[in-house]
Image (cartoon, helix red, strand yellow):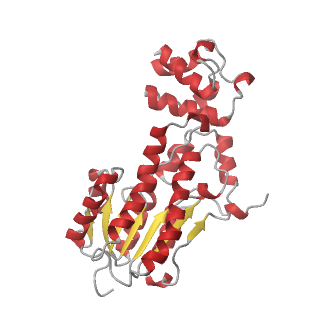
Amino acid sequence: MEQRLLENMAEILEVEAEELTLDTEFRDDRFCWDSLKGYAVLVMLEEEFDAQVTVNDFLKASTIQDLLDFCEQ
Amino acid sequence: MDMKKWIVVTGASSGIGLQTARQLLENGYCVVATARNAQLLDQKFTTYSDTCIILPWDLSDPDRIKEYASLVHEKAGAVYGLIHCAGAQKTLPIHMLKSSNLTELFQINTFSGLLLVSAFAKKGYYMEGEASFLLISSLSAHEGAYGKTAYAASKAALEGFVKSAAPELAEKGIRINAVAPGVVRTTMVEKHFQQLTETQRNSTIGEYPLGLGESQDISNLLEFLISDKSRWITGQTILIDGGHTVRKC
């Protein structure tokens, strides 16, 4: 699950999966973070991991580990 | 209304399709109600036993559209109208587009619409001199709909089709038009809104001088366009957007 999440996040953030770890802060400026990427993450979590995450909970997440926690709930 | 006027409504189990089908039934038309979910269709339309044919069908399979049209023809005869409300929406960054996304969207939004028109334009399948076909497009095809490239393309294709189809269908006495709504409060839109922040939601709502649309705003227009009150309108895409495209900038 961890590897799959990193690969999905790599696609959204437009980097190679090897550049990401669970400690990666996905809203970092180097990823040109915007609301569309945020939306894509929410949809990805639901479609790929069956994780229904509210927007408010998602706004509190800052690392990929936080996203993995959603998937494992 | 003297003789039965059967109108095929796709996407009839929810949103604009459901509202339109019900409104047509209440106003004396007969409806062939189609959607994928048979159970939902039954729930929504069982009270209309004489004037409604419930016909569940998955229109995303283009190879079975002709079969669907044959079944409609068998049950209802020549149709007075077709209103294609079935559709799907997808918001996705452009760099993530895959052919599977395009296939999925184009099959239900575009190919099914074109093939339905083709199938019901066959002699004997439509009421000569009276029939009206309507396709649901979207405001996304008319503005910079951020993150909605594939969806906007699938709807814009319908509008190109409508222009070229109009003269050919006019020779058969069929009118064809598209309706391009802005944001309308439907289940599909509410689901999308749940994945936006409050700021994003309020920003969207603020871009509509007359507020967001309701399904009945669209069904009122569709009823007009399906009827002979709009007999001189064909080949058009009519924007209905609560003033969005003319909002203060």
Residue A13 x/y as whole percent = 63, 26
The quarter of the picture where residue B74 lies is bottom left
Foreground residue among B47 and A70: A70
Residue B16 x/y as whole percent = 46, 61
Left or right of A44, for residue B146: right
Foreground residue among B23 and B233: B233
**Furthest residue in direction left, as rendered:** B74
Q: Quadrant of the N terminus of chain B?
A: bottom left
Q: Residue at x 43, y 60 (%)?
A: B85
Is residue B178 visible in this depiction of the protein?
yes
Q: Residue at x 48, y 77 (%)?
A: B167
Q: Residue at x 34, y 79 (%)?
A: B28
Q: Residue at x 56, y 30 (%)?
A: A41
Foreground residue among A44 and B95: B95
Q: Quadrant of the C terminus of chain B?
A: bottom right
Q: Taking A49 as reference, is B197 above or below it? A: below
Q: Taking B78 as reference, is B249 above or below it? A: above
Residue B18 x/y as whole percent = 39, 61
Is residue A73 visible in this depiction of the protein?
no
